[in-house]
Amino acid sequence: MPEAIRQRFAQEDTEVISIPLNRTIPLPHQRLEKNYEWIFFTSANAVKYFNFAQLNKQAKVLAIGNQTKKVLNELNINVDFQPKEGFSEGLVEEWLSLAKTKQRVFWPHSFNAKRVIYNALTNRGHIVFEQVTYKNEFLVRDQERLKELLLSETLDYVLFASPSAWNSFSKIIKDFQQLPDDFWKRIKIAAIGPVTAKVIEMEHHSVTVQPQIYDMQHLYECLLQDIRERG
């Protein structure tokens, strides 16, 4: 969390405790030697771990989310298309509506990425070149920190920026024998967008805070607003 945002929470008498529920770890991968018309960056981490020496400068660039676009722009990479929806399902629907001919798409992504993009595009006859550049991992030391936090602190909100973050949290919670009886009654859940919210709600938990624009800045703003309104 940026220090400026942390200070704004402090002004609302709110302490922010950060525990990585999914650290990113680079994976070895081969350079793509094929031509493509589009490259899809579906997260800021996909940009972080991408080898730009293999970038086809004539290819069009797609970016999911404001943060991904910002990171690309900071590298002087222009984004040709940004879906209105900041998740894979929204990307697929919007992009397929403008792709009038068969396209060759390069998609660098996480080992943990869902198959939504690949399946939807290939089912329509497009060619997708994949490159797995990193993975998400919930490290043992972070798991232990979370358990200590649950034992020692009374939490008011828990914030999730991805479905995988929720899955890591949920796994610890399900196996945690010392969870207070009223934990789920008093905790309020904040989710970055509808895909993350859906995963949470499938486990019968309610999402209290969710921004209309699915990025971290707007999630922080919505959370701050909810804290103020509750006094």
Image: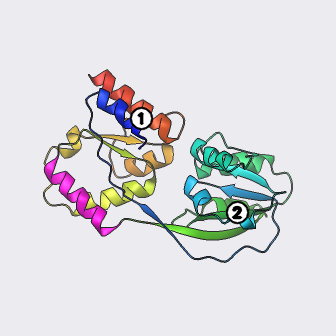
Provide residue 72's location: percent of width, then percent of height.
66, 49
Question: Residue 20 lies in what quarter of the image?
Answer: bottom left
Q: Nearer the viewer, residue 200 or 104?
A: 104
Amino acid type for the residue under numbered disc 1: Ala
Provide residue 22's location: percent of width, then percent of height.
41, 60
Q: Is residue 33 left or right of residue 222?
A: right
Q: In the rendered picture of this protein, how many numbered marks are placed on residues?
A: 2
Indicate whether 73 appears above or below 209.
below
What residue would you read off at disc 2?
52
What residue would you read off at disc 1?
4
Amino acid type for the residue under numbered disc 2: Phe
User: Mark 2 or mark 1, which is nearer the start of the sequence?
Assistant: 1
Indicate whether 190 appears above or below 152.
above
Residue at 27% x, 33% y: name it: 14
Element at label 2? helix
Residue at 54% x, 35% y: name it: 213
Are the two marked residues, 1 and 2, in contact with CB atoms closer than 8 angstroms?
A: no
Q: Mark number for residue 90?
A: none
Residue bounds of the magenta highlight: 139-153
Most common SS among magenta residues: helix
Question: Residue 21 lies in what quarter of the image?
Answer: bottom left
